[in-house]
Amino acid sequence: MTAPIPLHAYDDASGTYKPVAYACGKCKTVAASPAQYIGEDADAAARQSASEHCGPWFCACGKERPTRHDLVCQTCRRAESDKREAERRAGYLAKAKRVPLDEYEGDVFYDEDASEYLTRDEVLDRIAEGEVPGLLFGTTETGFTLDASEIITAEFESGDHHEDASEQLDYGATDALQEALDAWCAEYAAKVITSWPDHSVIVELPTRSEEGDEEGADET
């Protein structure tokens, strides 16, 4: 921080010159005025703001902040973000239903520790190789769909039609288009499936020894 430069103006009431603003001592930019603040400490607050205009700026922990607009340093920001994530994770872990792998109906899983999706075969292969996946969640699926109403609305809002054009659309047009779109999606986009983590279901995995016990029981 550098000492601010006071800018004075004559005050008729007191007959003296008083600071009406403060410039940054480094870049000379007028940075703050007591008029921006309220109370007896307005002048001190303006001086402080001007002195911090070009930094450096410090966090409550003592480390430097990236900019004067940042309230905390990078380390404290990451720590707060990690804390919120840990609290969020603890919340859904406490509420999640636990389902054994052989009882889970889906075939795609989300390994949260590795941030990757695994098929059932991949999960079983890793267990067999002793590489047990981390925290495994079930997944939900989203197929490829097209919404006739959204498509028609977007066309009328494109600016290529007069303001009452939508009123000239024949009755049943939206339903007819939706039927055609559904048929198109079923014919050409049935394989377009996107999986998303389902944090309401934790899939419990058998250990390698448990699998061995099951195989031994099958052989007898």
Image (tube, rainbow, N blue to C red):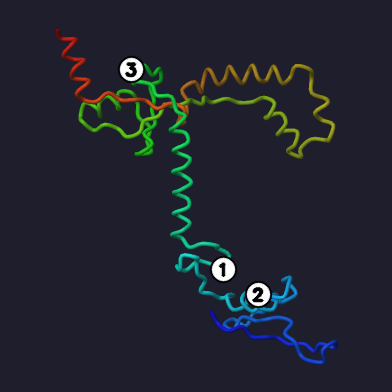
**Mark earlier in primary sequence (1, 2):** 2
* Residue type beneath disc 1: Arg
The one nearer the camera, 18 or 206, is 18
Q: Which residue is mark 2?
A: 45
Q: Residue at x 73, y 38 (%)?
A: 158
* Residue 131 occupies quadrant: top left
**Mark earlier in primary sequence (1, 3):** 1
Q: Residue furthest front?
A: 40
Image height check: is 136 above or below 188?
Answer: below
* Residue type beneath disc 2: Ala
Q: Which residue is mark 1?
A: 68
**Helix, strand or loop under label 2:** helix
Q: Which residue is mark 3?
A: 102
* Residue 98 occupies quadrant: top left
Task: State the separation of the CA atoms marked 1 and 2.
Answer: 15 Å
The one nearer the camera, 92 or 141, is 92
